[in-house]
Image (tube, rainbow, N blue to C red):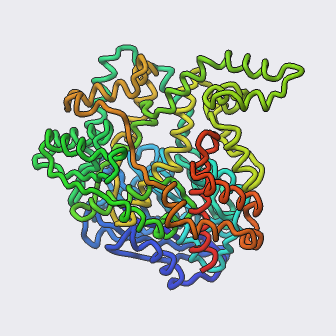
Amino acid sequence: MCGICGFYSKKDIRIGQLKRMNDTMVHRGPDDSGEEIYDAGGGYRAGLAQRRLSILDLSPLGHQPMSSADGRVSLVFNGEIYNFEELKRQLPDYPFRSRCDTEVLLAAYEKWGISFVDRCNGMFAIALYDRKDGALYLIRDRIGKKPLYYWSEGGNLAFGSELKALMACPEFPRRIRRDVLPRYLFQQYVPEPDTVFENVFQLRPGEILRFCRGETEKSRYFDLAERYREGIAHPVTDYEEGKARLKELLLAAVKRRMIADVELGTFLSGGYDSSLVTAMAASLSAAPVKTFSIGFEEEAYDESEYAAKIASYLGTDHTGRIITQREMFDLVDSIPEYYDQPFADSSQIPTMLVSALAREKVTVALSGDGGDEFFCGYGMYDRIRQAQRLDGLGGLVYAVCGLPGLRQARMLEKLPLKVRAIAENRDARFKTQLCSPRYLDCVRSMAGEGEVRFLQEQGYGAADWQVRRMLLDMETYLPGDILCKVDRASMKYSLEARCPILDRDVTEYSFRLPQPFKYGNGVKKKILKEIAWEYLPKELLERPKKGFSVPMDKWLAGPLKERLCDYAETGFLRRQGLFDPEYTRGLVEGWLRRGDGGAGSGANDSRILWAFFIFQQWYERWMER
């Protein structure tokens, strides 16, 4: 696990400047660093840099940038290739010098060309410079586990694992894209491929960018929706056969992720996904697996007792800690430093705390991420199923409210929120993206017009709304929110997080499993749960999902109130020129005056205001200092 950055440019970027870019990410790789610059011809120079967190082959032989034996290719790499030993056996003619997966990538590229990436099973962001054709390749893994940003302007390109590396690049302009702000407020993050800055983008999952002397080409080596269609065309018809095969693939995925030359453990929340991963790791380990969980003072959020019971049942070496509200609050000011693009999923705070706890004893932690998206685990999927069943009735209600003589808007406002959401869900492009019209109006009034929902949904072609929403979450929410959250939180403490459920073989096999295998008779994650019951008693796992949460309402109305009001001061907002001053000020004052978080309005104002607060905190750190 590391941080990478570099450039391909006609600008006179010196090695010291490249080092400054690289050192902004020292938390991602405290063990080693390296920077090199190459003549790329035509007045261009290419630079590669890496901060290393040593996981495999801790010797200097793992130093990056690393070059091939013949000197043709150099690369920097962030992540892990879990099948590197298998690939290495297919490359018997290459004179390997190290035991690390980085050198396998060099050998694989020299044998198979850029198509080598099709053979890789892992999480990765790769920057590869080929002296023979003078091209720089940027490559991101299939699901988007590892981040990769790039700035392309004026025939020059710079890239980095984090935006702060680009902000340290000479002449970086820091121009904010106003059109992404409504989407950010609505989604709580900036969806790919955009970023908060003009001419700066996120490489999408499964994408390759080729840059050569000012010319850019992009291609996809993995398209999730296409792979789903291929998988469902060859469905598994026998449930027990599917369960046995899925268990086999999950065990293999966990085993691959237990390969490390450093201490390893697991996050254990007490939920199904982390418990299953932990149980499988325990079954494969000769020594007790190290497990980590945090709990909360407020009983409504606390699951630590369940995690402790599961750890006891499995005989793990467990470390748990109860977190106070003060400890969570103290991390608020660090958010823009490590989430250097506005990011408002408040569960980032407890994720940072459990990462800090794990890092006290291990360098690698396995997590259960991906189970909800690939196996139908979110409560939203229940509501989507219901919305599809009631869609016809909702259309009738909408039509009746619009009959001559009736004021449709007023009639709809009198309906219960859940009924209204279904009745007003008339746009065929967004059938699975249920939301309150009041919420949409709020973010648009605050930050400007523009579509804040995702257009990908209409391209999936799945009749089942639940399947469509799962695919949408896999392509958007999973990489943009969940994986981003875990990557930045874990790397803040130089901890590598690995996700067995997101293994290539597991995810692609999941597409062959019919939806009733995942959502059977109203049971979410049916097949995954039944596998978990083979390792753990059902009564230890079967309970309502709580998840990580923070009291952001109390904070915004309490210790953060003065800063929130300062951020919403009309004079400041006019000078800033990003949010509507009068509307925003009124929203803040109204919310504080009501003291109910917008209860009953369907707007969830506190969620919008938290995103606004986090943005202004980011702006203060990265635009004003």
Question: Which quadrant would residue 517 be assigned to in this image?
Answer: top left
Residue in front for this viewpoint, 444 or 244:
444
* Residue 613 appears left or right of 551: right
Residue for point 58% across, 45% down: 220
Residue for point 43% across, 23% down: 519
Quadrant placement of the C terminus: bottom right
> Could you tell me residue 361's position as x and y percent?
21, 62
Residue in front for this viewpoint, 189 or 198:
189
Residue in front for this viewpoint, 68 or 370:
370
Residue 85 shows up from this direction: no
> Could you tell me residue 9's position as x and y percent?
63, 73
Residue in front for this viewpoint, 214 or 133:
214
Residue 515 shows up from this direction: yes
> Could you tell me residue 190's position as x and y percent?
60, 54
Single out the residue that lies furthest toward the right. 404
> Could you tell me residue 231's position as x and y percent?
48, 26
* Residue 446 appears left or right of 62: right
Residue for point 41% across, 40% down: 370
* Residue 354 appears left or right of 48: left
The correct choice, above or below, for 146 with respect to 50 in the image is above
